[in-house]
């Protein structure tokens, strides 16, 4: 397995464990992070703040990766994201992630999804 794919595996595993600090440490210090219609954030502090706002809303969030393709330092993952809400409902939405890895850390992550149903 390539360094890039190992990095993505660590990243998704941290989400599954609701481990914001490990998740943040998967990124470079100057990483760009863009999820759905939320404004892009940059760097560890802002990525951590974004995660800290979202994580308490859900019991857990799981990624079911359907496929990942790598070209150089960029990976594209097709996945379903299951949001396990505090009210017991599970909302699953399709997602496409574009993740660029630099020296074993995520340099940029752009997640294309409509997360609206998870927050409704």
Image (cartoon, helix red, strand yellow):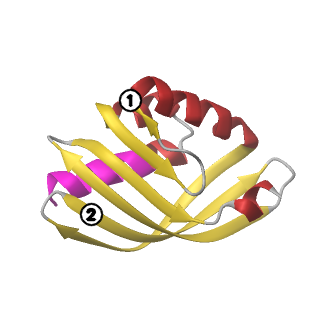
Tell me: 37 left or right of 4. Answer: right
- Magenta-highlighted residues: 1-12
Task: Give the alpha-carbon distance from disc 2 to disc 1, as whole Å.
Answer: 20 Å
- For mark 2, give the secondary structure: strand
Question: How many other residues sit within 10 Å of disc 1, few (<14), some (14-19) or many (≥20)?
Answer: some
Q: Does 75 appear in magenta? A: no
Which quadrant, please, contains the N terminus? bottom left
Q: Which residue is pictured at 73% across the width and 65% down the height?
A: 91
**Mark 2 Cα within 10 Å, few/some/many (few <14, many 20+)?**
some
- Residue with the most extreme top position: 45
Location of residue 81 in the rendering, given as x and y in whole percent from the top left corner: 58, 64
Q: Quadrant of the C terminus?
A: bottom right
How far across and how far down the image is residue 115, in percent?
66, 61
Q: Position of residue 95 (x, y in %)?
A: 52, 68
In the rendered structure, the answer to whether residue 30 lies left or right of residue 24 reads: left
For residue 10, which numbered disc appears in the image? none
Give the residue pinned by disc 2: 75
The one nearer the camera, 24 or 34, is: 34
Identify the residue shown where x is 37% and y is 41%: 32
Q: How would you classify the magenta stretch by its main secondary structure?
A: helix
Q: Give the answer, above or below, for where 28 lies relative to 60.
A: above
Image location (x, y in percent) of residue 15: 51, 45
- The outermost residue toward the right is 87
Image height of 11 relative to 51, above or below: below
SS under mark 1: helix
**What residue does disc 1 label?**
43
Determine whether, in the image, residue 33 is placed left or right of residue 35.
Answer: left
Q: Is residue 44 above or below residue 3?
A: above
Give the quarter of the image for residue 80: bottom right
């Amino acid at each position: 397995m390539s360094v890039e794919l190992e990095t993505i595996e660590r990243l998704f595993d941290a989400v599954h464990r609701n481990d914001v600090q490990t998740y943040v440490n998967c990124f470079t210090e100057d990483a760009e992070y863009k999820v759905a219609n939320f404004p892009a954030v940059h760097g560890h502090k802002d990525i951590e703040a974004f995660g800290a706002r979202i994580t308490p809303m859900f019991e857990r969030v799981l990624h079911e990766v359907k496929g990942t393709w790598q070209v150089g330092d960029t990976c594209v993952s097709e996945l379903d994201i299951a949001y396990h809400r505090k009210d017991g409902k599970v909302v699953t939405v399709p997602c496409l992630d574009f993740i660029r890895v630099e020296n074993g850390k995520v340099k940029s992550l752009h997640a294309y999804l409509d997360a609206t149903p998870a927050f409704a």
